[in-house]
Structure formats: structure tokens, C-alpha cells
Amino acid sequence: MSAQFINSIITVLIMSFGLFANIIVLVTVRKMSSMRSSFGIITKNQAVCNILMCLLFLVFVGPLQLTDLKLPYELSRFVGLISMIIFEVSAQLNFINSFNRVFSVYVIFLYEKVFSNFNTYIMICMAYAIAIVMCTTFYELLECYLYFHADLWIFSYPETEHCNHLTWYCDFIFNIVLVNFTLILNLIAAFKSRKLHRKITFLAPSEVSNRRQRELNFIRQSFCQGLFMSISLIFYHFTAPLISNKILLFLNASFWAFMLAFEGVIILISNREIFTAVKNRKSGEF
């Protein structure tokens, strides 16, 4: 069995599974009354980004791997640009979600005003705008295109000094700082949330426990998403260049995209409220 065929099967299986999982998350969150808040709106948009990435790989990468068809460099680079925009939007939405959690436990009296549904939609639109402008500038106007390498079946940048510097600072450094800052915000929010709920005495113990669990669900979800995004950046920029095996290279260099497919599963596992809603929906209780 050729490496090309194995990689194509891996792509189809992961992205099909990711598409299914993220559609479940999107449909479930849309129906949950508790997720009509700012956090729920952001989570739904994250699921949409994940679905778009899965579809992009299923429609574009999968067929190219299954056949010997080689698309022109000019065409594949636009697909690379779109995939990079989706990744950047996802990273920024994860940051907004973490910032949301910090506000909810540190600046409670301003939370409803700052993270109203209207303001949340504005933040999401800004995330899309920033990602589009940033990726178009760095990878199109500055001519460092992310194209599909037909022989290795991965998205890659041209091996030039100009692109190496640009991707190091504009891709890796920018995103790793953003992701690590996201992780730090989640840890800060978790610490404060734990202390805050210990001080609540006017609610019944069961109500305090439910609130604490719900808050930890949100924080756990954002933390896991940020952690996997950080790992994907390390894989692409550090471990992938050291690998010669085409299958392992493909897995390492494509983990940044596969990670978005896995996010649907990460959300379901880390957020018990959503997972319980999915189980209840299957049993007809939702």
C-alpha cells in the first residue's frame, strides 16, 4: 500500500469524523438555552471554522491525494490562503473565549455589558477581518504563498530566506504567543473561579456546585483547544522538518488542520454540559 493512498485515507477518515463531530457540536449548542450567551456564540463560530476546514480538506486535499492530478501552483496557493485564514480565525476566537472567562470571574459587574451578544458578534467580525487582512498581507502581498506540495501532499511555504523569516515571525511567533497567552488566561480564570465559588454562601450547595462545574467546563474547553493548537504549531515548525518518512511527515505537517477537526471532539469531552446535552438529545430528552 503506497504512502499516497495511506495519507489520503487518513485525510478522509479524520476530516469526515471531524466534520461529523463539529456538526454535532454546532447543532447541539444552537439548541441549548444555556449556550445563547457570549460563550455559546463564540463556540458556535469555532465549530463553523472547524467545519469549513474539514470540508476544504475533503473537497481539495483528499481527491488530490487519491489521484495523480496536480493543480497549478497559482490555484493551490489560494486554497492555502483560505485554510490559513480559517486557522487564524479559530486561534483568535479561542483567545476571545479565554478573555471572556477572565472577565466573567474578575470583572463580573462589567461582564454583561462588555460581552453582550451584540458586542460578541462585533468581536467575532473583528477576528475574521484581522485574519483576512493579516494573511492576505503576509502570504499574498509579500509573496510567501502557502501552496499544496504535490509530491509530499502537504501545504508548504517556498524554501527561501524571505519566507523563512516571514513565517517564523508572522506565523509561529505570533500564534505561539497568542496561544500561550490564551492558556495563561485560562489558568488565571480557573484559579479565580475556584476561589470565587468558595466564597458564595447565599446559594444552596448544589447550585454552587452546578455553577462551579459549568464555569470549569468553559475553562477546560478553552484550555484544551489552546493546548492542542500550541502542539500543532510546534509539530509544523520543529518536528516536521526533521522527518523523512512521508506518512509521518504528512501527519506532523498537517496536524494544524487536523487539530481543528479534533476540536469538535475536544469540545464534547472537555465540556460536560454539551456532552450531556448530546446524550440527552439521543435519548429524546433534549
Image (cartoon, rainbow, N blue to C red):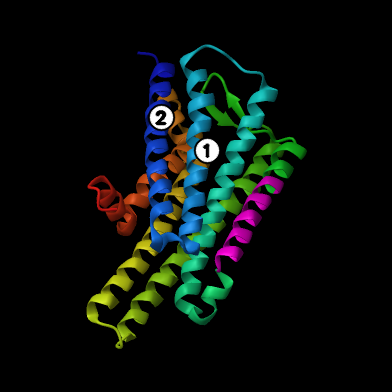
Viewer-side residue, 227 vs 33:
33
Q: Name the element at disc 2.
A: helix
Residue 36 versus residue 236 in the image, above or below: below
Specify the farthest residue to the right: 141
Per the model, the C-alpha gap separating discs 2 and 1 is: 24 Å
Residue 280 versus residue 208 in the image, above or below: above
Q: Tag on residue 101?
A: none
Mark 1 packing: few (<14 Cα in 10 Å), some, or many (20+)? Answer: some
The residue under label 2 is which amino acid type?
Leu
Q: In the displayed structure, does residue 214 sit left or right of residue 157?
A: left
Residue 34 in sight from this viewpoint = yes
Q: In the displayed structure, does residue 175 sit left or right of residue 206?
A: right
Q: In the displayed structure, does residue 72 sit left or right of residue 178?
A: right
For the image shown, how many numbered marks are present on the structure? 2
Magenta span: predominant SS is: helix
Report which residue position mark 1 lands on.
Answer: 52
In x, y percent, where is residue 278? 30, 49
Viewer-side residue, 98 vs 250:
98
Report which residue position mark 2 lands on.
Answer: 248
Q: Give the range drawn in magenta.
A: 116-133
The N terminus, quarter of image:
top left
Q: Is residue 197 magenta?
A: no
Q: Which of marks 2 and 1 is nearer the N terminus?
A: 1
In x, y percent, where is residue 282? 26, 45
The residue under label 1 is which amino acid type?
Leu
Residue 158 in sight from this viewpoint = no
